Image (cartoon, rainbow, N blue to C red):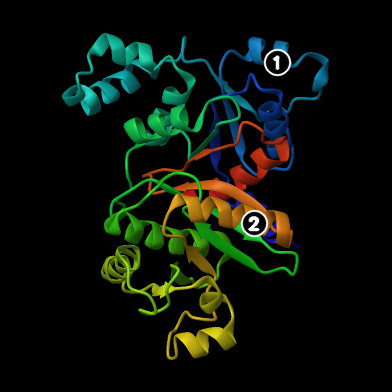
Amino acid sequence: MTVIDQIKARAKTHNKRVVFPEPEDPRTLKAAIYLANHQICVPVLIGNMESILGRAGEQLTDVPASIEYIDPETSPHREMFARYFYEKRRHKGMNAEKSYQIMGNSLYYAAAMLVHDHADACIAGAVNTTGDVLRAAIQVVGMKPGSRVVSSVFLMSMPDGNSFTFGDCAVVPYPDEDQLASIAVDASRTHFQLTGEEPRTAMLSFSTKGSAEHERTVLVRNAVQKARELAPEVTIDGELQFDAALLPAIGDRKAPGSAVAGKANVFVFPNLDAGNIGYKIAERLAGATATGPIIQGLAKPMNDLSRGCSWEDIVNTTAVSILQSS
């Protein structure tokens, strides 16, 4: 059983409600049907039921009755969601009329469902851009206590059965010390949520333990200390080069005594250049399967999809989101 199969099996036991604000996309509806039929979650589609099913036409049949539909235009909760959003954003110039209009947008309505515990997770991005999804998430859902930045990880499933977590590979271009520390802590906790393995987190650099001096290595070194202060229970070390973090023989030689070197299962890249390139190299040259981007740092899970995703990707991201919500 692959790690994503294990995640789907675990997700099935939690009986969560997951909201999908893009049901006009056939991939989303197909994923919702699969999720309902396999009892992985209760899918909630945002939009008019007749319109959603009408667009599907003959492509999809036997839509399960357990799928729920909510149309913001007729929802009795829209006014309550609008009042909440107005109060939350009035310091930014929000007014009541504009707030009500915004809550007619499926992304914002879905995010408000999370805040008010009408759903446990939200999946979007098959149609909307990452910027659209994250803007709704940050403005409505907000940050998780203790997190200093919204970031992402990819769960990398290797052909040999091992799994690693890579972050940040999709959101924060050049994190500062505080942001990098927060990314490391959140990535560690995400790894444990998804795999059940105790995280051993390597904060990566082109230097290992002072082998090179540069402002970028100092930034990583300082971020390590801040991450340890944020989460003393998590095993974090750095700065480490990738080979020293992964391979025991090199880790023992370059960072003797490290609890992470040669044993890392979470890799925190110093910037988005390195992270994005790194996970794609692992995909294309090592045959890894990348699940993500998995968004972290939010008060409730609202995950983003690639607009090139498959319906299977939506299913997998849903299962991941369920575990994040648990």
Q: Which residue lies most toward the front here? A: 213
Residue 270, x across and y down, in percent: 41, 59
Residue ID for mark 1? 53
Residue ID for mark 2? 281
Residue under the point 61% across and 29% down: 126
Secondary element at tag 2:
helix
- 72 with respect to 215 (left or right): right
- Report whether residue 4 is seen: no
Residue 213, x across and y down, in percent: 33, 73
Sequence order check: which comes first, mark 1 or mark 2? 1
Residue 115, x across and y down, in percent: 37, 35
Q: Nearer the viewer, residue 180 or 40?
A: 180
Q: Which residue lies most toward the left here? A: 91
Residue under the point 46% across and 71% down: 202
Whole-number angstrom distance, CA of label 1 to CA of label 2: 40 Å
Circles 1 and 2, Cβ within 8 Å, touching? The answer is no
Q: Nearer the viewer, residue 163 or 254?
A: 254
Secondary element at tag 1:
helix
Residue under the point 28% across and 71% down: 225
Q: Residues within 10 Å of mark 2 (few under 14, many from 20)?
A: few
Residue 72, x across and y down, in percent: 46, 15
Q: Nearer the viewer, residue 65 or 22?
A: 22
Image quadrant where residue 2 sits: bottom right
Q: Residues within 10 Å of mark 1 (few under 14, many from 20)?
A: some
- 11 with respect to 119 (left or right): right
Q: Amino acid at mark 1?
A: Leu
Q: Amino acid at mark 2?
A: Ile
